């Protein structure tokens, strides 16, 4: 039963991690559409009632699993004082790499963004929005430092790097490594953001 105040009891620590890990595993095995609370409960050796005491729906469970996944693509809010260094640190550091299994998990939920309104709302609000806001802050600081060209739209440029990388992963099936990230930053993102044409001589190693 959900308490009268609407708050759901938390399943914490190792038990919560086991359930969320089981959710990611089911997502990789079966996809979003075929994933069920029953299946996750069985894989995590928990009761369905236990899951529903913590998560009100499959959508909220899957979004929590994506957020908490060890392989989740985070965007750390770094501030080195230079846009290129910030972008490299954010997307090439330990939490910025595109892990193949996490990319597969993300691919498994793409259809649900168009077919499941509840999931789309939860995903965009709780998973996507914080990452976009962090990227926007990185570019906003670059704007304050005078690094960006006049008139650059922060709402367009901030998610552009992630958009290019995800396009390569999901549509082209390409592997995204640190060299790929660096190339996209140097040849696409920085020229668009700063108005300065790409020059291999001008970029650091």
Image (spheres, rainbow, N blue to C red):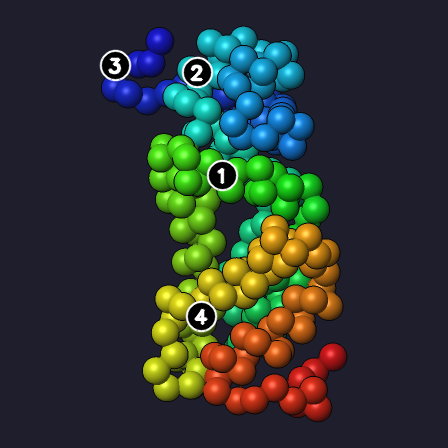
User: 132 above or below 27?
Assistant: below
Q: Residue at x 36, y 74 (%)?
A: 153
Whether tag 2 and tag 1 are in contact, CB under 8 A, the answer is no
Mark closest to the chain's N terminus, 2 or 1: 2
Q: Nearer the viewer, mark 1 or mark 4?
A: 1
Distance in Å between CA atoms under marks 2 and 4: 39 Å
Distance in Å between CA atoms under marks 4 and 3: 45 Å
Is residue 190 or residue 28 the one in the foreground?
28
Distance in Å between CA atoms under marks 3 and 2: 15 Å
* Observer able to see residue 93: no
Residue 89, image quadrant: bottom right
Q: Residue at x 56, y 51 (%)?
A: 74
Distance in Å between CA atoms under marks 1 and 4: 25 Å
User: 86 above or below 99?
Assistant: below
Q: Which residue is mark 4?
A: 157
Distance in Å between CA atoms under marks 2 and 1: 24 Å
Which element is circle 2 on?
helix
Left or right: 173 in relation to 109: right
Q: Which residue is mark 3?
A: 4
Which element is circle 4 on?
helix
The N terminus: image quadrant: top left
């Amino acid at each position: 039963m959900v308490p009268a105040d609407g708050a759901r009891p938390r399943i914490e620590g190792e038990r919560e991690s086991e359930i969320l890990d089981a959710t990611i595993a089911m997502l990789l095995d079966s996809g979003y559409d075929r994933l069920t609370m029953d299946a996750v409960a069985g894989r995590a050796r928990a009761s369905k009632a236990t899951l529903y005491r913590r998560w009100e729906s499959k959508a909220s469970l899957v979004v929590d699993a994506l957020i908490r996944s060890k392989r989740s693509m985070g965007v750390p809010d770094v501030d080195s004082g230079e846009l290129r260094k910030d972008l490299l640190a954010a997307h090439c550091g330990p939490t910025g790499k595109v892990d193949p299994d996490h990319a597969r998990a993300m691919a498994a939920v793409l259809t649900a963004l168009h077919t499941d309104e509840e999931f789309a709302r939860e995903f965009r609000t709780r998973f996507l929005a914080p990452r976009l806001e962090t990227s926007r802050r990185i570019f906003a600081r670059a704007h304050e430092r005078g690094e960006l060209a006049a008139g650059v739209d922060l709402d367009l440029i901030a998610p552009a790097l992630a958009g290019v990388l995800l396009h390569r992963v999901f549509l082209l099936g390409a592997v995204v490594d640190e060299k790929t990230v660096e190339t996209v930053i140097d040849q696409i993102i920085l020229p668009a953001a700063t108005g300065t044409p790409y020059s291999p001589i001008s970029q650091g190693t």
